[in-house]
Amino acid sequence: MGFQTEFNSVCKFKSKQELYELLEYGRGKMVKSGFRVFPTGQKVIAYTPDNEAIAIVKILVSIAEINFQGEEVTEVEMELVRKLTEEEARVQTALAYEMFFGEQA
C-alpha cells in the first residue's frame, strides 16, 4: 500500500463522461484507482482519454480511501480555469507524449 504521485499529467481523464461534466459545468470529479497524491490548490493541464491536452484546471480536493468493495481509490475534485487554445493544446500534447505517454503513432 503506497502512494503514487500525479504531479504532471494529473488530470488524465479515463472517462469521457467525467471530462464532459468538467467542460460543461466548470467543475468536475474524477476517480482514479490506487492511492495517489495530487497537488491540491495547484493548476495543471487536463488531458482527454486520447492523451490530448484540453484545459487548465485547478485541483480543489483530493481524497484517497478504500471503498466499499475494498479497492484503493482516489477521488479528485477540480474546477475549470479555461480551455486551451488550439495552439496551446497542440504544444502541450506534443510535450506530454515526449515526457509521459511515449512516442505518438
Image (tube, rainbow, N blue to C red):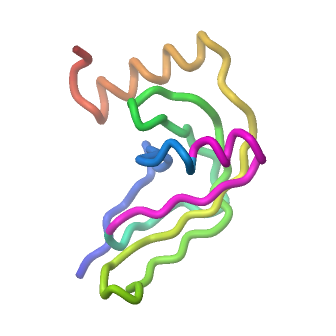
The quadrant of the image that shows the N terminus is bottom left
What number of labels is visible?
0
Which residue is at 30% across, 35% downward? 100
- Residue 39 in the figure: left or right of residue 4: right
Which residue is at 46% across, 46% downward? 13
Which residue is at 59% across, 17% downward? 88
Is 103 placed above or below 30 here?
Answer: above
Q: Which quadrant would residue 40 be assigned to in this image?
A: bottom right
Residue 97 position in % (x across, y down): 32, 25
- Residue 30 magenta-highlighted: yes
- Residue 62 in the figure: left or right of residue 97: right
Is 81 placed above or below 35 here?
Answer: above
Identity of the residue furthest to the top in this view = 87
**Over which residues does the magenta segment extend?**
19-33
Viewer-side residue, 48 vs 43:
48
Which residue is at 57% across, 44% downward? 19
- Residue 36 in the figure: left or right of residue 88: left
Residue 56 position in % (x across, y down): 64, 37
- Residue 82 magenta-highlighted: no
Residue 21 position in % (x across, y down): 66, 48
Is 17 placed above or below 2 here?
Answer: above
Residue 36 position in % (x across, y down): 39, 67
Is 16 placed above or below 88 here?
Answer: below
The quadrant of the image that shows the C terminus is top left
